Image (cartoon, grey):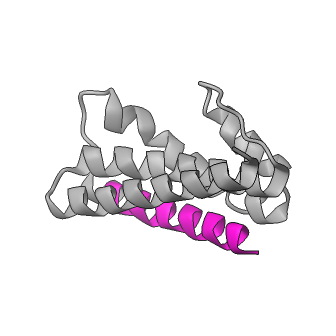
Amino acid sequence: MGPKQTAELHLIKAAEFLAAARIDLNAGHVNAATSNAVVSGINSKDAMCLKLTGSTSKSDDHGDAVAELLAAGKRAADLAPVLTRLLKLKTRSQYQTTSVARSDAAKAIAWAERMYEGAHAALRT
């Protein structure tokens, strides 16, 4: 499978996790909503980088994902701060005992939407 097809599959996953994040927030599941928004954002990053550079990293260090966006051109680099904000919520939503605030979960979804929109636009050009 080539980079274009793989990018499309990541975009589909990004949309699925974004939809799940919205459902979770409506149900009051703020940690799940945030976690799903983060996963959506990561998949959007993968889709965008695959489209713009032909590759994406699968590093366990998500800081590498931000660097990857920065190196993929202006369109991707403009979204690096958005991904950074999303990734800062990953640990709290998935591993810590304290929950994410509802307002932060809503922000995470908005950031994931921006990531998805950027990836979608990149794949359509």
Residue 87: percent from left, percent from top:
52, 42
Residue 62: percent from left, percent from top:
60, 33
Please identify the dominant SS of the magenta region. Answer: helix
> Up-down: is 71 above or below 58?
below
> Up-down: is 58 above or below 82?
above
Q: Is residue 32 visible?
A: yes
> Up-down: is 15 above or below 85?
below
Q: Which residue corresponds to the image point at 76% horizontal and 43% vertical from the top-left?
A: 68
Residue bounds of the magenta highlight: 105-125
122 in magenta: yes
Residue found farthest to the front: 1
Q: Which residue corresponds to the image point at 49% horizontal and 66% vertical from the top-left?
A: 113
Residue 15: percent from left, percent from top:
45, 61
75 in magenta: no
Q: Which residue corresponds to the image point at 50% horizontal and 41% vertical from the top-left?
A: 88
| Left or right placement of residue 76 versus residue 117 in this view | right
Q: Which residue corresponds to the image point at 69% horizontal and 74% vertical from the top-left?
A: 124
Residue 80: percent from left, percent from top:
69, 53
Quadrant of the rendering where the N terminus is positioned: top right
| Left or right placement of residue 5 versus residue 110 in this view | right
- Toward the viewer: 9 or 46? 9
